[in-house]
Amino acid sequence: MPSTLRTPATVEITVEETSEDLRYLALVRLASGEVWQMVFIPMGWKPQPGTFQAEACFVPTVEWPTLTD
C-alpha cells in the first residue's frame, strides 16, 4: 500500500454569510508554493475565520489534500 505524503500547510478560513446560509472557504498554501481553494461543510464544529497552521496529507488515490491540525 503506498504511503501518504505529509507536508506543512497554512490554511486561511473565510466565512461568507448570505441571507440564507453560511459558506465556508479554505485557502490552503503548501511550502512548495501550491495553493488549493476549497469550499467545505463543517461537521460537528464551527470554523472561525483566520489563518492557521496545519498538515496537508495527500492520499495516493485523491488529487487534493486532506488537512489535520
Image (cartoon, rainbow, N blue to C red):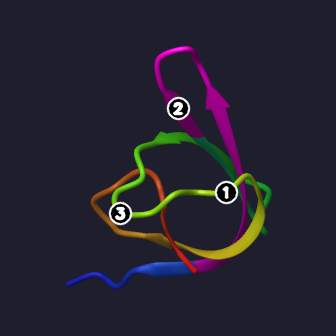
> Tag 1, which secondary structure?
loop
Between 50 and 7, the residue placed more toward the observer is 50
Q: Residue furthest front?
A: 19
Residue numbers of the magenta segment: 7-24
Residue picked out by circle 2: 22
What percent of the width, then of the height, locates residue 35?
70, 48
Check the picture and name the quadrant holding the C terminus: bottom right
Give the quadrant of residue 33: bottom right
Callout 1, which amino acid? Gln
Residue picked out by circle 3: 44
> Tag 3, which secondary structure?
loop
Residue 12 is covered by the magenta coloring:
yes
Q: Are the two marked residues, 3 and 1, in contact with CB atoms closer than 8 angstroms?
A: no
The CA span between labels 2 and 3 is 15 Å
- Mark number for residue 48? 1
Callout 2, which amino acid? Leu
62 left or right, relative to 66: left
Q: Residue at x 78, y 69 (%)?
A: 31
Label 1 Cα neighbours within 10 Å, binned few <14 / some 14-19 / many ≥20:
few
Label 2 Cα neighbours within 10 Å, binned few <14 / some 14-19 / many ≥20:
few
What percent of the width, then of the height, locates residue 42?
42, 53
Residue 41 is covered by the magenta coloring:
no
> Tag 2, which secondary structure?
strand
43 left or right, relative to 6: left
Q: Residue at x 70, y 70 (%)?
A: 9
